[in-house]
Structure formats: structure tokens, C-alpha cells
Image (spheres, helix red, strand yellow):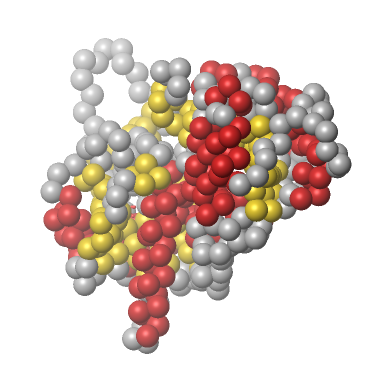
Amino acid sequence: MDDGALNGRRIVVGVTGGIAAYKACDLVSTLVKAGAQVRVVMTRNAERFVGRLTFEALIGGPVSHDMWAERADMEHISLADFAEAVIVAPATANIIGKYAHGIADDLLSTALLVFTCPVIMAPAMNTRMLGSAPVQANLRLLSERGVRILEPAEGRLACGDEGVGRLPDTATLVEALEDALGVASDSLAGLRVLVTAGPTREPLDPVRFLSNPSSGKMGYALAAEAARRGGAVTLVSGPVALSDPRGVEVVRVGSAEEMHEAVQARAGTVDVFIGAAAVADWRPVEASDHKLKKTGREELTLRLQRTPDIIAGVAAWEPRPLVVGFAAETEELLAHAEEKLRAKGLDLIAANDVSRLDVGFTTDANEITLIDATGTRSEFPIMSKAEVAGAILDRIEELLARGRESGR
Ligand code: C5P
């Protein structure tokens, strides 16, 4: 979060009746600490999960909850007059459905029809419920009307299921608000940032490929954060299930070779390169034009060849951008990361241990150590990928400033 960016800004937080309602307390507390003026609207069902008093203590004033409370103003109108941005977190299927169809049967659903400022919905519910046709159709409708829909995070859900449907962490919610309010910083203004993300797919035949479980989340978080800081960002992405980050040019590719070409096409036009893609190291020497048949075969031998090392190619460019890579390792993390930093000619490397289940490839969280070309190490605790992206970009900004001082 940028210092002072939310100071004095007027934000309405809508809280609906999902188990994640307790996380809205942290959001409200964070916004208040950042100096924002916050009004909270709770639905009746939200009050089954969290007491009104909790929010009242956090904002130091009353919570809006009753359409029929005796007061001088009409609250649904005064909330809309007040708000510069609105976030509904968590947003249940119910409020999403009501908002999509203009149903106004309580204070929050009524006020939603009056707001003219940016509105953010943070859906949080069971994976199957989220994926249901009506909920998806309602989210699409809202999105077409300009409502910002936040992508739910993945992980363990209250019902015990694993999957997509969790409320994103507070940093992501705050960032969405900053974005909506247009209070992004400009610390990367004038700089061109190129990011690679996701896995690559190396075809064996028209229907099969070699790949890895990279979700692309780390690279997407970096691209989003770099754009928020004012950078002109291009994201070259392998196949992932994520939507385009706001304000980022996205180039979609399949194989390592395609990613390499997309990156090379930008040689000489990049100030910062971040290689967050999990590029396949090997590809089949030949990809069959037709589906490989199993009949009459007990074994199949594949011949593999190396794919281009994209980041090492970038590090050899003249003029050379600041080059940042990742080392996803399962053993001797820091030693291997340092070796990679040197071998590939990088300025900075983010080392993360992908043998762990709680952080790394497919999760929403990551734990990294940054190592720069002078061998300086900075360790970070386990954080969301949005927060990790912030830490990496802070370090990149320091290195850029140092480079400018030494006239590089
Ligand atoms: O060699 P290794 O794959 O472990 O290196 C990881 C770093 O190098 C990451 O930043 C990754 O994006 C980048 N890389 C690349 N092209 C490859 C392999 C890795 O850009 N072919």
C-alpha cells in the first residue's frame, strides 16, 4: 500500500452473510489505519457471522444496517453521496443476484442501485456455488456494466472443500480500492516492464503436451503491481486461467519457443524484465502432426531437446534491462539460486522452495528470499503473491535508483 494513498478517501464497505465476513474486519481496520473515512453497511445475514459492534468499534461510529431506521436523511442516498468507492466483501451469491437484477429489499441492495462511483464485488462462496450457471451469469452481467469483480482466491473453504471461492487477502482488496480510486503511485512511470508468467506447453502431438503446474499467479501479480506503479507493462503469458490484469498489455503464447519469440521481439524496448514464467526446459524433438496411436505399442520413447533460455537471452541484450528471475527449487534453495543468478547474468533473483505445499507454484501465498548481484540477501515471511510482488518491485526500484546514481 502506498503511504497516504487512502488518506481521507471515503469508502463504503458492504458486508454480506458469508463466513468470510470476519475478514472484512481486517479490511475495515486496515482502511481506517490508512486514514480512510469508512462507512460499513451490513446485511441481516452478515450480522449472524460478525457483530455490528465489532465494525462500530473499528470505524468509531454506527454501522448502517436498517432501511427503516429513524434518521434525518435517507441513508441509501447519503451513502451514495458519501462514497468515492464501494467494496462488497464478502459478496454472497444473494447480493450478486440482487444487484444484477435490480432487486432492492434491504439497505445494501438498495444503496447499490444508487452508487455512481466505482463498485467492487469480492465474491466468496463454495466453489460449486461460484461456478453455478446463475452466479456466473450474474457476475458477467455486473462485469459488463462496469462493476469490478475480484477473482476469488483458491484454498480451503469453510465447508471443508478445496477450491476457488475464498475471499482474497486484505492487500488485494485494498489494492482494488486504490485502483478504483485512481490512487496508484507513479514510481515506475516512464519505465517499460516486460514480465513472463505461467507455464509453457511443449506439444507431443495435436492433443498432448509436456507442461508443469505453474498457475501464473506470481507473474500476474507482478504485472498488475508494476502497472499500478505507473509502468508500461507487457505480460507474455503461457496458458493460465487468470484474467488480464488491468492496464497491462497481455500477449498469450503456448510453447517456450513462442514465449522466446514474443520476448525477443521486444529487445531494446525494455527497462525491466521479470522472468516469472515456469518455462519448460525440454521439448519433444518432433511433435507429431497426428495424434500418437497406442495400438500395437507397449512403449514410447520420447526424444527431448533443450528449449531456449529466455531470460539468459534477455540478459545478453544491449542495451540491457534490469533482469529479474525466479529460482523455484526443491533443495539447497539459496545455493542454487545464487548459481542461477550468476550463470544467467541476472541482477536479482527471487528464490522460492517449491517442495512445500503451502507456498509456491499453485498457491496464493509465497515465501521468498531475494538475492542481488552483490550477494545481498533479503528474506521475507510468508505473504500473499500480491504482497510478494510489492516487495520485489520495491527492491527493483532500489536497484534502478542505485543504477541511476552510478550512471549505468
Ligand atoms: O533454469 P531455471 O528454469 O531454474 O531458471 C529459472 C528462471 O529462468 C526463471 O526466472 C524463468 O522464468 C527463467 N527461464 C527462462 N527460460 C527458460 C528457463 C527458465 O526464462 N528456458
Instruction: Classify 44 as above or below 36.
Output: above
User: For residue 248, which quarter of the picture?
Assistant: bottom right
- Residue at x 51%, y 70% (from the top left corner): 187
**Residue 234 visible in the shown view:** no
User: For residue 325, which quarter of the picture?
Assistant: bottom left
- Indicate the position of residue 303 as horizontal and vertical percent values: 23, 36
- Residue at x 60%, y 61% (from the top left corner): 7
Give the mark count: 0
Query: Relative to 179, is 100 on the left or the right?
Result: right
Instruction: Classify 260 as above or below 113.
Output: below
Locate the C terminus and report the quarter of the image it occupies.
Answer: bottom left
User: For residue 133, which quarter of the picture?
Assistant: top right
- Indicate the position of residue 102 as horizontal and vertical percent values: 82, 28
- Indicate the position of residue 376 as horizontal and vertical percent values: 22, 68
Single out the residue that lies furthest toward the top.
296
- Indicate the position of residue 400 as horizontal and vertical percent values: 39, 75
Most foreground residue, 341 or 68: 68
- Residue at x 34%, y 18% (from the top left corner): 293
- Residue at x 65%, y 44% (from the top left corner): 61
**Residue 329 visible in the shown view:** yes
Instruction: Classify 351 as above or below 362.
Output: below
